[in-house]
Image: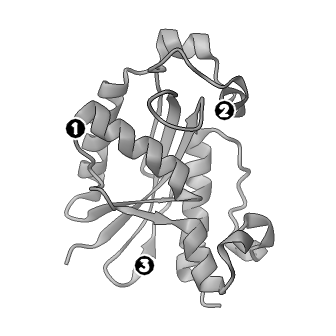
Amino acid sequence: MRADVYFSLDVEADGPIPGPYSMVSLGLAVAGRSDGVFTAADPTADTFYRELRPISDDFVPEALAVSGLDRAALLRDGADPATAMSELSAWVTRTAGAGRPVIVAYPAVFDWMFLYWYLLRFTGASVFGHSGCLDIKTLYAVRAGVPIGAAVKSRMPAHLLSKRRHTHHALDDAIEQAELFANLMAWRP
């Protein structure tokens, strides 16, 4: 059995779903690995970040504003999505080595939806497979024995949370989430 290599993911987008709207940036940070025993990684050591050229003319101004990114600059200077997804796939494969790459995110649903759609659309395959995703929110709910609606950062014990601010910069937030994930994996409530 291959060890899992956990990649913390954060996505910023200019709308609620991929296709009609665009992923404008994404960040990944290696959170750790597990062969049955979890070993945390320094999430600042192995990272990937890209700002992407939008794929459609449609966008929700309020959604784009969350990232603080400029649409005109993204249209002019953003990475081509096909190139960025190919680079991401190569980086994940190289970084995971013999391990199985698994995405972790809080919550994973939004970020995974965009990443998976972009990988399939622009490379034809997902380096994470179709199910290589673990939701940090669900992990906390199960470990804490609380309903999913109570699995919010403001109700988590402070020692589980990262000391980093949530900035809505995709790489900053991927690193922050990697620390939360590592803390949860070590937590024995």
User: Which residue occupies 59% across, 84% down?
Assistant: 143
Tags 1 and 2 in contact by the CB under 8 Å rule? no
Spatial separation of the CA atoms under disc 1 and disc 2? 27 Å
Q: Amino acid at mark 3?
A: Phe
Q: Amino acid at mark 1?
A: Gly
Choose the circle earlier in sequence order: 1 or 2.
2
SS at badge 1: loop
Spatial separation of the CA atoms under disc 1 and disc 3? 31 Å
Give coordinates of residue 161: x percent, y percent: 70, 67
Label 1 crowd bin: few (<14), some (14–19), many (20+), radius 10 Å: few
User: Which residue occupies 71% across, 70% down?
Assistant: 149
Give coordinates of residue 123: x percent, y percent: 24, 35
Give coordinates of residue 67: x percent, y percent: 66, 32
Residue 44 in sight in this render: no
Label 3 crowd bin: few (<14), some (14–19), many (20+), radius 10 Å: some
Instruction: State which mark lies toward you, 1 or 2.
Output: 1
Q: Amino acid at mark 2?
A: Ser
Label 2 crowd bin: few (<14), some (14–19), many (20+), radius 10 Å: some
Spatial separation of the CA atoms under disc 3 and disc 2? 32 Å
Quadrant for residue 122, please give it.
top left
Which of the image's four quarters has the C terminus? bottom right
Tags 3 and 2 in contact by the CB under 8 Å rule? no
Give coordinates of residue 103: x percent, y percent: 42, 58
Q: Which residue is mark 3?
A: 38
SS at badge 3: strand
Choose the circle earlier in sequence order: 3 or 2.
3
Instruction: State which mark lies toward you, 1 or 3.
Output: 1
- Which numbered tag is attached to residue 67? 2
- Which numbered tag is attached to residue 124? 1
